[in-house]
Amino acid sequence: MRFSTSAVVAVLPLLASAQEDPLAQYKAQFQNFLGQMGSYIPNPGAHDPVAALEAKMGSMRMHTLTLENWKDTLYEPVAPAATVPEEWWVLVTGRNKTCFEWSADINVGHCGKIEQAFNETAAKFALTPSSPHVGYLNCDDQPILCNSWSTATGYIWSFNLLPSPAPVDIYKKRLNLTTTTSADLVALNSAKSKEGWTLLDSWFHPFNGKATELGLSVPYGYAIWAFNRVPNWLFMLIVSFASRSMMQASYRTSRSRYHN
């Protein structure tokens, strides 16, 4: 059997990667399969590119994150040889579907207050050198992205990025949905400290997480979105049928043991 020089050259990288990680080839094939499957699944997200461009070019310099653009957007200001991380503040927000709190069976505390405070802060940051870049993620409009990050609304995420593939530190901070003001956010940035923030250490870390490494974060996002689309009555019906089937199977097993 003959092997051409080009074929041998093509195989060498695969052999090297296999020696470094015996499962690398299978991981790559699995990720490729997920990518192909994802291309056939419609994105239920909503995006207004005109409004997003106006926010980006306007006084706030606000970037709107979507499932398709979030990574390119965050890396856009990172210089190839940078040694100091570029910081982003991303507000995770939503409307009536995703941004509410429950109090005495009444949903209160919608995200309008923190959005206003964040917008005012973004305009101030745009005039202040060395301030964080700002981004906006609406979970009503981008449910898959929010689910893939396993994030809730009402948070600011602070991304600290060096050139890829350097690890990315992410801190998050919960905002009070009813009392947060722009002055609070400006003071938070002026402190130049992450005291009171939570360092993200999760399977669903957008850059360093295990689910991201295995290519599972977006499929997980779709799975949670699909699960949330199931009506409550249908879910209860499925649970009822499943529990009844389990009880019947257990009853038959116990009778069989008794007669034996």
Image (cartoon, helix red, strand yellow):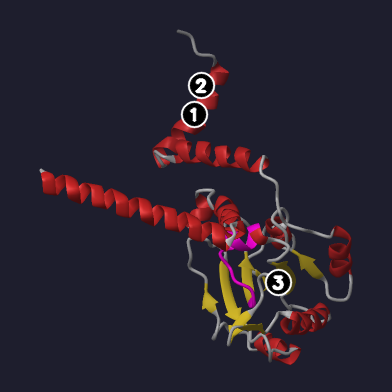
Q: Where the C terminus falls, by quadrant?
A: top left
User: In the displayed structure, does residue 260 sit left or right of residue 203?
Assistant: left
- For the residue marked with disc 3, what is the amino acid? Gly
Up-down relation of residue 31 to residue 14 (above or below):
below
Where on the picture, by quarter, is residue 151? bottom right
Q: Where the N terminus falls, by quadrant?
A: top left
**Residue denoted by label 2:** 8
Q: Which mark is residue 94?
A: 3
Kindly state the secondary structure of the residue where label 1 is placed: helix
Magenta stretch encompasses residue 150: yes
- Residue that appears at 77% across and 58% down: 46
Up-down relation of residue 55 to residue 259 (above or below):
below
Where on the picture, by quarter, is residue 179? bottom right
- For the residue marked with disc 2, what is the amino acid? Val
Magenta stretch encompasses residue 166: no
Would residue 78 be seen by someone viewing this image from the given angle? Answer: no
- For the residue marked with disc 1, what is the amino acid? Leu
Q: Which mark is residue 12?
A: 1
Kindly state the secondary structure of the residue where label 2 is placed: helix
- How far across and down, in percent of the image, does residue 23 sit? 41, 40
- How far across and down, in percent of the image, does residue 131 sit? 74, 78
Up-down relation of residue 114 to residue 27 (above or below):
below
As drawn, the residue found furthest toward the top would be: 1
- How far across and down, in percent of the image, does residue 233 sit? 55, 61
User: In the displayed structure, does residue 256 sit left or right of residue 99?
Assistant: left
**Which residues are drawn in magenta?**
144-155
